[in-house]
Amino acid sequence: MQKILLVLSLCLVIGIAKAQKITSPNGNVTLSFKLDEAGKPTYNLNFKNRAVIKDSKMGFLFKGVKPMNENFTIVDTQYKNDDNTWAPVWGENKEIRDNHKEMFVSLVQKDSKRKINIRFRVFDDGAGFRYEFPVQDQLRHFILQDETTEFNLSGDHKAFWIPADYDTNEFPITTSKLSEIEGLIDEVRKEPLAAKAPSPNVAVQTPLMLKSSDGLYINIHEAALVNYPAMFLNVEASSKLSSHLTPDVRGNKAYLQTGYTSPWRTIVVSDDARDILASNLILNLNEPSKIEDTSWIKPTKYIGVWWEYFTGGGSTWAYSNTGDVIIGKTDFSKIKPNGTHGANTEHVKYYIDFAAKNGFDAVLVEGWNEGWEDNAAFVKEEIYSFTKAYPDFDVKELHRYAVSKGVKIIMHHETTSSVASYERQLEDAFKFMVDNGYDAVKTGYVGPIIPRSEYHDGQWMVNHYIRVVKAAADHKIMVNSHEAVRPTGLSRTYPNWIAQESARGTEFESFNGNKPEHTTILPFTRLMGGPMDYTPGIFQGDLSVYGSNKAKLSTTLVKQLALYVTMYSPLQMAADLPENYERFADAFQFMKDVAVDWDNTYILEAEPGDYITIARKAKGKSEWYVGGITDENAREAIIDFSFLPAGAKYTATIYADGKDADWIKNPQSYEIKTMTVTNKTKLKQRLAPSGGVAISIK
Amino acid sequence: MQKILLVLSLCLVIGIAKAQKITSPNGNVTLSFKLDEAGKPTYNLNFKNRAVIKDSKMGFLFKGVKPMNENFTIVDTQYKNDDNTWAPVWGENKEIRDNHKEMFVSLVQKDSKRKINIRFRVFDDGAGFRYEFPVQDQLRHFILQDETTEFNLSGDHKAFWIPADYDTNEFPITTSKLSEIEGLIDEVRKEPLAAKAPSPNVAVQTPLMLKSSDGLYINIHEAALVNYPAMFLNVEASSKLSSHLTPDVRGNKAYLQTGYTSPWRTIVVSDDARDILASNLILNLNEPSKIEDTSWIKPTKYIGVWWEYFTGGGSTWAYSNTGDVIIGKTDFSKIKPNGTHGANTEHVKYYIDFAAKNGFDAVLVEGWNEGWEDNAAFVKEEIYSFTKAYPDFDVKELHRYAVSKGVKIIMHHETTSSVASYERQLEDAFKFMVDNGYDAVKTGYVGPIIPRSEYHDGQWMVNHYIRVVKAAADHKIMVNSHEAVRPTGLSRTYPNWIAQESARGTEFESFNGNKPEHTTILPFTRLMGGPMDYTPGIFQGDLSVYGSNKAKLSTTLVKQLALYVTMYSPLQMAADLPENYERFADAFQFMKDVAVDWDNTYILEAEPGDYITIARKAKGKSEWYVGGITDENAREAIIDFSFLPAGAKYTATIYADGKDADWIKNPQSYEIKTMTVTNKTKLKQRLAPSGGVAISIK
């Protein structure tokens, strides 16, 4: 016993006396941890001996009981190295290496005897840490008032940010210095979005992309967000960030029980922007797949009865213009149809035919089910039936027809954020899907959440999204969630969570809402957590051809093609109307060819806000696809084909902006040429303003 | 068209010019309606030419849009008489007469053109009215900020009240003048209860029982509370009451869509207190049964593994004392049992044997399922499994055993108010019940509600309780909900909603919490809306015999027997431990004999707060049961047997307080005698302080 006490005392002395360090396998990244004089947990992070995160505090405030962010002693520290390689079910690479060093620190609070552990992992491209609340006598159930993790930066970096909002992540991205955010944020928040619950603080969303004046690229986010609210970052000074958790309406952050581990706080860092895009740090900090048989999970290329609802052409989700629809009471077969309902059997068959003819896997159909008359009635809880189709949508016949054509129909569950109602219907909805041959669902969360205590990014909703994904997995259903919390790499653990929206997607093109640089930033922000269903592929960018909508696309036609490579997703939509693809059949060929799953990915060029060029090898095939995009400035991409195997010649088909192409004046100008390439080839390719290049290689 | 306009104009003129009246079939009750000079809807109510409700305003405040409580014109008024008789599935009488006059007033708001209708029905014992929002172009979805219905009384009446609280109705009842409530309410609110959300106003709950100084008995409540929050009554002055709806956490009262009709606001009135108890006004204002086949709904007398959790004898709901139980993860077969778990197979068999031997229909078992270790962890959402039993509760074996003994087991779903979690499990829980032979469930809602936007009495929870009852009906399951919103006669519409608690029940006897007068008031308040699972039958009232609990029952033993007649319910529990019934086997005979369903009910004597004597004829049998109770004062009940058929002699077994009986000093003193009675018999029977009398007649 005396011996134990002696060891403990030694630990305590060591703990207070000096910082404990771990350094990444290649020595580039160093993380230090110590307790300060007040017993406050403190860490810092260096990259190649340059400060990334300066001394920053860690811990928690509790509701109704003393905080757990000071007065600690270290009772134990354990170190571990790990180096292993795993294969994702789908991804940018067929194998991912997880090579890190771990430091696990056990803390006890002097007065309260409450325990908390912190687990740090350091990789060559950054670090992650999480809090662990062990089961203990002194603590059992508790309410988090706040997490007090800081990220003290080394300077007033350039930031690519959207404002913190508990209900939406669909803001346009602003680029400014951190110190300028306070002055800009109120204006940015005026963006009209379906549900907004702005943070009262000057705060931004993660993944937050930063660039220091001396050329360090830093990305702060989180991994494995489970049973916890999403984290925002307070911007308290030009270089001081701190965690800001999504509350519920009562102002509480999380309701927890000991035995719980927090999400990982992640910092990806490099002096080369390409390393940020290539990083697997967030995936590596997530748990392996919990789904044993994943054979039914299939990367998918799809079209859909969707864009026509945005074009201004008159097609509607709703079947009628009736004002008194009540789900479970209204007999839709007896009400007057409005004649503009998009999801009718004949029209869906037209889409199925087009998908079959062009090799697409699936057709998404929105507006198929009862209730769309009230889809903007945010006060209504029982809005939709997820098991009853409108009278003009013949579920059985379309199932038969789709099967005969070898095409899947993708289910749509727009909830209008009436989530408790959705949960009540969930099992029946999934059974309905299985009974009718659906194996994938697009979920939607437009508008404020019901139950009205909750926000999109709070603990309760975080649990909801995962609950849906798990229930879907039980029915072998893939999930593509829209307007959900931003992803944190959980698609490793639940690979049926095949994509999310969770950012400003192509639909905003129909409101003139996207800037040319938008897609050069998204891979550095939103996509750090997982694939995005961005729904590119708009060829007819001038919407005035359809009617009164005057919106114009923010890119050239070719840039739309390049997005299939630069915006990684195992789920890719060809979003435009079939008629436009028929009009530009030669350009459409790239969308027909391009893969959605990959053996390898090569980040060739990258600068957030300016340009991205990526090459990828199609999974299991000797085919490569290259995509390059630029912001509003024309540029010359340099495409180094050294990613190709040595010694062989390949035919590259190059889809390039026409010489006179310009996203404003001449977006549909393009040229298609072929050339022979080897792994020695270096191609200089001009991209038009907001233009791109797409290359297929066989 | 001109003609229509002329008629409309005439109506308008008439509408403003004078009040419109209806008078009850026997002429006793008169209701008047008019618009005042500002176009505000106004009503009043008279009983035998005495003012019950003086001119009182009606209407609504909306969130974000103009109120609908003024500036109206009357566009139409329609009158209707109804006189019909219907048979409840179970009840105090085998037939109920619904004889009323109806006035239906259609209003339109001058500026907004929004429409609202008010439907009044007048009965011989009072009146009801409700608001109806017709489908219209000017209004579709809306949020109620408040209902502005007033109940202006004729004086500072005596009131039997509990304070308005959005989360509980388990307060003791206070008797005071209305004007005294403001001075008393803060003290009353200090009552320790598991969840409290006091109204900020000086406000009380309904059913509110009032007595005027000139002897009018008035009861204000509501009928058919559906998709709307429960109503409290603001006490704004000594005689001015107004509606106060339960909000959600955002302060909103209700989220509605036109086509909606509000609950009925009910006023029962008489100059004889017995008429209040005999009233069927609230049932008559509810819809007929929506369940077609009701053959499976059976009034039930039951015992249960329940009171032992309150006695202080050491029996526990929880199977273990483990601190880190997680539903779905913890393997309960591997954790250490605490050895005090009440719901174990052997113990339940002992209860089944006792039920079988004594002719009880069923045994309630609480604490059978996983999760009770955290039953007071109000922050935990996933507390219970409703399909997994503790390891020592053998579901299949107990099912087999119960069937072999001809006894049912009553399921228990304590939710600890984690309602969203319960809804997610509901279908599986009911299927589990059906698979294992359960046909009745006691639900429980202890603690604050999750979702955390909601209160027990708010619109969302009101919908929840009904949702559970409907889903239960789909599985032919009867529901007895505890800690739910107070009932409003909906058991007519959903007769499987066989009872509720929704008031301070017998469990509070174990905390010394009930006063002798309590059960002389409950039939005038809580029971006006429907039957209560009061769980009487405690013979061993001194709990110190079990251990450290010093609580003593607030009644004599005989009064406990009388409650089976005075507290109407088709679900009656014999709540005490079997050993106590074996000790007092002769008194227990009454509980074995007493019926739980009735052909006729005769209110013989009644004064709220003082005494009640009721006789009832058992359904389909020539058997009658009489119960008489008194408050802390001894009294002589006069039991007039004229309810018996003329010309025949019957044997009455009289369970009476012993001569020396007294609820404090000698509660277990009783005597049992038989006498011959006819319909000419008038029995004078002394009741001890907080005593009673129970009589069975064959």
Image (spheres, coloured by chain):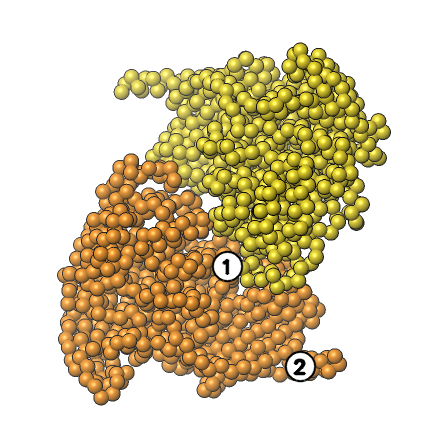
Chain colours: A yellow, B orange
* Residue B113 x/y as whole percent: 69, 69
Residue at the spot x=51%, y=18% of the render?
A99
What number is the disc on residue B134? none
Q: Is residue B194 visible?
A: no
> What distance separates the C-alpha of mark 1 from that of mark 2?
36 Å
Residue furthest front as drawn: A404
Residue linked to disc 2: B11
Does mark 2 fall on the same chain as mark 1? Answer: yes
The quadrant in which the C terminus of chain B is found is bottom left
Front residue (pair B230, A671): A671
The chain containing the residue under callout 2 comes to B
Q: Is residue A25 visible?
A: yes
Does residue B281 appear left or right of residue B661 in this picture? right
Considering the numbered disc 1 on the image, is that residue within a helix, a strand or a loop? helix
Q: Using the image, determine if residue B106 lies above or below residue A139.
A: below
Residue at the spot x=38%, y=18% of the render?
A11
Does residue B278 appear left or right of residue A379 in this picture? left
Q: Earlier in the sequence, mark 1 or mark 2?
A: 2
Residue at the spot x=27%, y=69% of the render?
B564
Amino acid at circle 2: Cys
Front residue (pair B587, A326): A326
Front residue (pair B179, B334): B334
* Residue B103 x/y as whole percent: 55, 79
Amino acid at circle 1: Gln
| Total labels drawn | 2
Contact between labelled residues 2 and 1, with CB atoms less than 8 Å apart: no
Does residue A575 appear left or right of residue B131 in this picture? right
* Residue A554 x/y as whole percent: 76, 36
Crowding around mark 2 (Cα neighbors within 10 Å: few <14, some 14 to 19, many 20+) is: some
Considering the numbered disc 2 on the image, is that residue within a helix, a strand or a loop? helix
Residue linked to disc 1: B459
